[in-house]
Image (cartoon, rainbow, N blue to C red):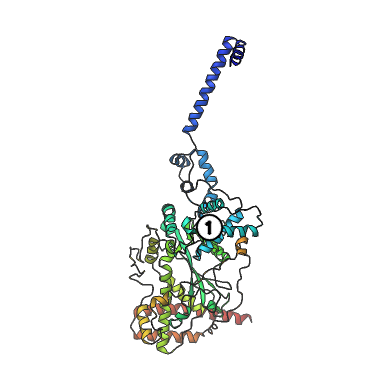
Amino acid sequence: SRDRSSASSAFLALFPGRVLASLTACSATTTSFHLRDTMSTQAKKRKILSLEQKAQIIAEAESGRKKAAIAEDFGIPASSLSTILGNKESIKKALASGTSSKHKKVTRPLHEELDKAVYAWFVETRARNVPLSGSIVQQKALNYACLLGIDDFKASIGWLNRFKDRHNIAGKVLCGESMSADVDGATAWKATNVAGILSDYAPADIYNADETGLFYEMLPSRTLDFKGQRCHGGKHSKKRVTVLLCTNMDGSDKRPPLVIGKSAKPRCFKGSRSLPVQYVANKKSWMSRAIFTEWMVAFDRDMKRQGRKVCLLLDNCSAHHSNEVELTNTELRFFPPNCTSVLQPLDQGVILSLKRAYRGRLIQRLLLNCETGRETKVDMYMALQMMAAAWNTLGRAIIANCFTHAGFAEARPVNSAGETADVTDDGDEEESPAPGITAAWTRLEKMGNVPPNLELDEYIGADACVAVHEDVSDEQIIKAARNDEDSSDGEDDDVQDAPAVATASQVMDAFDVIRNFVAARDDDVAMGLLTECENRVTTLLAVKRKQAKLTDFWH
């Protein structure tokens, strides 16, 4: 210690007094700058925002608000704001894919393909209400790693926890117990998503799309044969279709239904230039990723044409996910797995109301045929006509109330006059989508055309369990896309032939018969509608006659 002191004194003696003073002052200044920088850093400590906050920033910027005001409100510098806006697509994708909105940043897993495959399998499995445990997920991850050729992967507890955290999977979902609905997951999703959606979009710009299966020719006498069937390609597969419905929150825009049948060219379509709904086909009449992607792109294109930015709510089935499509005017929001029965607005009564209206028409037709001794047959063309009519009669009040029941509280039910209306708990309105269905059902019961102990509600909802999309295989999940859509190009041999086209004389004779019938009942409204229809048909006959003359001239 004494040697170090002597050396220090000798070193200082080498410098003149003024130089030494200057060195001392310089040291003090450096210390002062260091303290000032430390204090400044502490005062301006970088603020870390959650994905939910970043989404709010993006929404405000897209609405046209000044960036300086946004940065001031969130307490971030302009550079951080620019970074967030530059990464807005990845932030939106992360939130749409199920990443927790509380996360501070978007992190990529080490094996991204493996993560996507395991999550796709998880979503598909939970959608079928199959109970899962952490060990099952770990084993499936190991299987997929082998298929992907990843040799160094270990499905550790740490990996499982990161996987669950990355995809916002609650612990109760992996509890090994079968649940009808993940109520806790639905509550959490509402708390973190609904307020933001209602804030960012007007009711007219919030849509929900969902599929349902329909046994389109099922009569009451056959209900017990069909009831509860999943219809995975069995004997009833030709008797069903999958229907995609889509509507916005206030019921002002009911999109034309998309119907998926088994045959691309049913014989009953011959002679028909247009259909009242969109119609496509594949071998199992199920929704597929390719069909949904095509529909979604067309939907987004229409929103762009209208100059609208909209939000589309979807369940998490694999057919709804496509990484190859960039949407410009549609934001997709997915419900968590096993929550659709609680969260999805169309599941709160819209789909059931459509089936009630459809089967109401079928019952009325059956009753009339029974009274006149005619056989009741329903081909695909007739089914599509009745389906379109049923969808068109569905009131805005029913739709708005179903959004309200799903947690979108700002949905205001309105009737056709634009006035607020109420829907009772069982989904009925003052103006029912199926007027007279109960009376017609009672008459059929008395005539012996309804099986004993079969209730009307059982008949209406007999196809509630019908599968609407294919159970995806491990190979399909690994590939992440199907190139072969298994579409059917052949004619459907199971439906009746198209009726022969009537002659002009037969058409006019038919109008005379109907006119006499309406006149005998003194119904001015029906007579007015009949006259309007007759005028239109007469015009069509005149055009056809003119075309025929031109053809004769050239030949």
Q: Quadrant of the C terminus?
A: bottom right
Instruction: Give above or below for 417 relative to 27.
Output: below
The total of numbered circles placed on residues is 1
Instruction: Give above or below for 401 relative to 58.
Output: below
Along the line of sight, which residue is nearer the eye, 532 or 255?
Answer: 255
Q: Which residue is rendered at x = 66% and y = 54% of the image?
A: 151
Along the line of sight, which residue is nearer the eye, 106 or 305?
Answer: 106
Q: Which residue is rendered at x = 50% and y = 39% of the image?
A: 78
The amino acid beneath tag 1 is Gly
**For residue 448, which quarter of the picture?**
bottom left
Residue 240 can be seen in this image: yes
Residue 323 can be seen in this image: no
- Residue 283, position in %: x, y? 58, 73
Q: Which residue is rendered at x = 55% and y = 53% of the image?
A: 160
- Residue 327, position in %: x, y? 54, 56
Left or right: 9 in relation to 414: right
Along the line of sight, which residue is nearer the eye, 111 or 303?
Answer: 111
- Residue 85, position in %: x, y? 52, 45
- Residue 178, position in %: x, y? 47, 64
Q: Quadrant of the N terminus?
A: top right
Along the line of sight, which residue is nearer the eye, 421 or 10?
Answer: 10
Q: SS at mark 1?
A: helix
Instruction: Give above or below for 404 relative to 380.
Output: above
Name the residue beneath numbered marker 1. 134
Left or right: 365 in relation to 79: left
